[in-house]
Image (cartoon, rainbow, N blue to C red):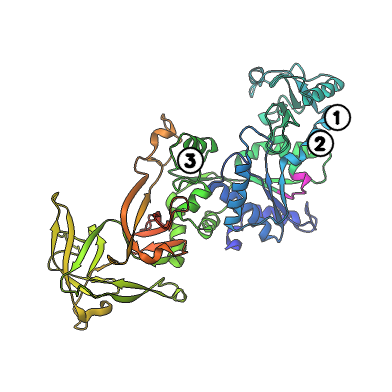
Amino acid sequence: MADEIFSNFIEDFVKEDIAEGGRVAGQQVHTRFPPEPNGYLHIGHAKAICIDFGIAEKFNGICNLRMDDTNPTKEDVEYVDAIKEDIKWLGFTWDDRFYFASEYFDKMYECAVELIKKGLAYVCELSPEEMRLNRGDLSHPAVSPYRDRPMEESLDLFERMKNGEFEDGKMTLRAKIDLNSGNFNMRDPVIYRINRIRHHRTGDKWCIYPMYDFAHPIEDAMECITHSLCSLEFEDHRPLYDWVVNNVTLPSRPRQIEFARLGINNTVMSKRKLRKLVEEGYVDGWDDPRMPTLCGLRRRGYTPTSIRNFCERIGVSKVNSIVEYSFLEHCLREDLNDNAKRTMAVINPIKLILTNYPEDLTEEFEVENNPNRPEDGTRTVTFSRESYIEADDFMEEPIKGYHRFYVGNEVRLKTTYVVKCTGFKKDENGKVVEVYAEYDPETRGGNTPDGRKVRGTVHWVDAKNCLDAEVRLYNNLFTVPDPDTGDKDFLDYLNDESLVVIKNCKVEKSMRDDDVTSYQFMRLGYFCRDSKHSTPDHLVYNRSVSLKDGFKKK
């Protein structure tokens, strides 16, 4: 699989660089995954993880995990722990190569001082608003009245900034590059700002913090990264990345390569918007199964294999595009079809009573756990006079092509007997609550010795040996493919039916003590036990994905 997926422009660049005479010939390929610890990872990050770690694996290299904690505004150790858990869950490891960007704060400060001494940086006193007004346009250069400030004065002011003598926003340190550049990222960008916020690792040691575009190339170079793989939004920032690497004293010169980010319809992946969903109570935390976060997908029943296959099969591109959510579901369905244990569960139960079956008789039947994996063996289920079946497996007035329960029709009960529907009972509201049938004892195992045709097969749960359960049916969180567009706020597109909770469902008794992660509820879909709310006394199952594949292959 890896050979197919990583035959792309990134791999071509790496091959070129490590070849004889190449930029890093003779060196080990070294990548990194540098998330900012200000939120939980989502499916878009999974693509980056698979590329960063995957390229390293492809070329027998190594990949670092680095927390890019240069902006302490929203950073927290909670996110650090969650990020590590998610990456390990996907199946990637970094051994002892775990770093924080904040480990390099002293080096970054030294690099800034070096730039000032070289005449390549200066302290600027323009406010953010003044800086915006003086940014210029394609016909006019940017302007800074502090650009020619003497080096000694900038050195003194920068040290005083570090020492906390000035209030937030009073001064910045700017790189001295080209105020007339057509790339606005090069118009003397800010590389340090004053920000009195306590850092989760360095405490109150620093009141100035480096900007990402200045810090990131230094971090990469300090770790001797050979290839800094990042999303396409940083393509216009690459000249600044290279400028920093070329103008300060560093142990290596990494190469930045950009790829298109992952976009999926019917969801949002902005951390700000995801945080809003969580903090304002629209969802049940970062791990809500409707969220595109990895912990949410995991709680919903997604497997590492399905997500890695999804990331590999969408490929690596230089062009942004939107992938159908149904393809992600398709990848999960493929994995679970092969590996999920089968079980019988009834979500909307009505009672089936076999009127000619002995009241005191209970039989046992062997049922296969997974027809695709004979090595998974079988399990024993009990069968008696009364069972539960799905409400929609009975129709008082059957429609054309309906082959399940209706008066006079024969139905095969999965694994057990052929039964013939003889009647039904309604409650005071006219709702069918019981279905009556007679079983044919000669058809044990569902066989018909006389060769008669029985077209419908129905699953069931023994009323004597079953458990109550709560089932949660998850749908798209938003009602439109792209909730980020249009005149409305993205919250206006929230789907009121994104979660349907069904209580008093009936499941096989063995499921209480089962350590299985994923099930196929026969004829209903793929489900997993909810990791947050399910207990032995209150079983809760989340629908991971339906049986029907909504993805259309092109």
Q: Amino acid at mark 1?
A: Lys
Q: Secondary structure at mark 1?
A: loop
Labels 1, 3: front one: 3
Q: Secondary structure at mark 3?
A: loop
Q: Which residue is mark 2?
A: 247
Q: Please state if 179 lies on the left or on the right of 356 as rendered.
A: right
Q: Is tag 2's residue or tag 1's residue first in the polypeptide sequence? A: 1
Q: Amino acid at mark 3?
A: Val
Where residue 30 sits: x, y (%)? 73, 53
Label ID, residue 10? none
**Mark 1 closeness class: few <14, some 14–19, many ≥20 residues within 10 Å:** few
Q: Amino acid at mark 2?
A: Asn
Residue at 15% across, 64% down:
406
Where residue 168 sits: x, y (%)? 69, 22
Q: Is residue 400 visible?
A: yes
Q: Which residue is mark 1?
A: 118
Q: Which residue is mark 3?
A: 268
Where residue 3 sits: x, y (%)? 61, 63
